[in-house]
Image (tube, rainbow, N blue to C red):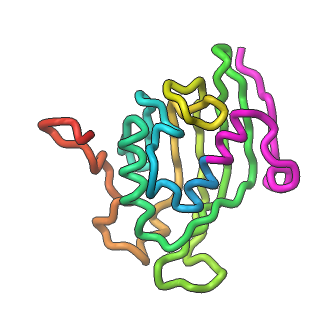
């Protein structure tokens, strides 16, 4: 039976840091995203080759390379991002994998915003299953196996065009006649 392994408030997360290898992996991923680290290297450092990523508007992305390409197009429009943690819950599953439920605020700076205050702050929920990696060179030998992301992208409407990647309801990398990667 799955069991709650940890609950950390945002304050606990800041003061004490990750409490398990899965949480260290998760923090490393968030730090990489906040530092625009998806602009180089391979997404397989974090996502398994058969990982499935579901975003809030029904688009689905598969595997690390596809995730990294999507993230470049999605986040490349922003000058900066920072994720503030509200709560992190880790559940240990029967198969030894971990499920993390994270409640965050995604702070985004648009390119013209050179201030210390974000252009927009968006509530975000992230649910992920983390398990053993299928390649070398990952954090703690772990990778995402499945991710569900929920964030209110409508809050970006005043800043982005209606056809921006963030509003797409289909996998923008999918081609009907062949694999993109």
Q: Which quadrant of the view contains residue 62?
A: top left
Q: Residue at x 45, y 39 (%)?
A: 53
Indicate whether 115 appears above or below 143.
Answer: below
Q: Residue at x 72, y 55 (%)?
A: 85
Indicate whether 109 appears above or below 40.
Answer: below
For the view shown, which residue lies furthest in the left direction?
A: 177
Q: Residue at x 34, y 60 (%)?
A: 165
For the view shown, which residue lies furthest in the front direction?
A: 137
Residue 20: percent from the left, percent from the top? 77, 34
Q: Which quadrant of the view contains residue 21?
A: top right
Point out the stretch of residues depicted in magenta.
1-28
Give the quarter of the figure containing the C terminus.
top left
* Residue 33 located left or right of residue 67: right
Give the quarter of the figure containing the N terminus.
top right
* Residue 38 located left or right of residue 86: left
Q: Which quadrant of the view contains residue 19?
A: top right
Residue 3: percent from the left, percent from the top? 76, 22
Q: Is residue 6 magenta?
A: yes
Residue 68: percent from the left, percent from the top? 42, 48
Decide which of 50, 176 is in the foreground and name it.
50
Decide which of 65, 5 is in the foreground and name it.
65
* Residue 110 located left or right of residue 92: left
Q: Residue at x 81, y 48 (%)?
A: 17
Q: How many marks?
A: 0
Indicate whether 58 appears above or below 112.
Answer: above
Residue 58: percent from the left, percent from the top? 38, 44
């Amino acid at each position: 039976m799955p069991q709650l392994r940890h609950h950390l408030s945002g304050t606990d997360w800041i003061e004490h840091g990750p409490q398990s290898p899965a949480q260290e992996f998760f923090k490393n991923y968030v730090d990489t995203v906040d530092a625009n680290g998806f602009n180089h290297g391979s997404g397989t450092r974090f996502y398994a080759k058969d990982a499935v990523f579901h975003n809030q508007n029904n688009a689905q992305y598969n595997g690390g390379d596809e995730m990294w390409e999507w993230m470049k197009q999605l986040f490349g429009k922003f000058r900066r991002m920072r994720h503030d943690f509200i709560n992190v819950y880790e559940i240990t599953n029967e198969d030894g994998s971990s499920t993390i439920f994270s409640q965050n605020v995604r702070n985004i700076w648009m390119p013209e915003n050179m201030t210390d205050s974000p252009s927009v702050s968006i509530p975000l929920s992230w649910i992920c299953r983390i398990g053993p990696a299928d390649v070398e060179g990952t954090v703690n030998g772990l990778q995402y196996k499945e991710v569900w992301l929920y964030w209110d992208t409508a809050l970006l409407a005043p800043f982005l065009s209606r056809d921006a990647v963030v509003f797409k309801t289909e996998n923008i990398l999918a081609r009907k006649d062949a694999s993109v990667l």
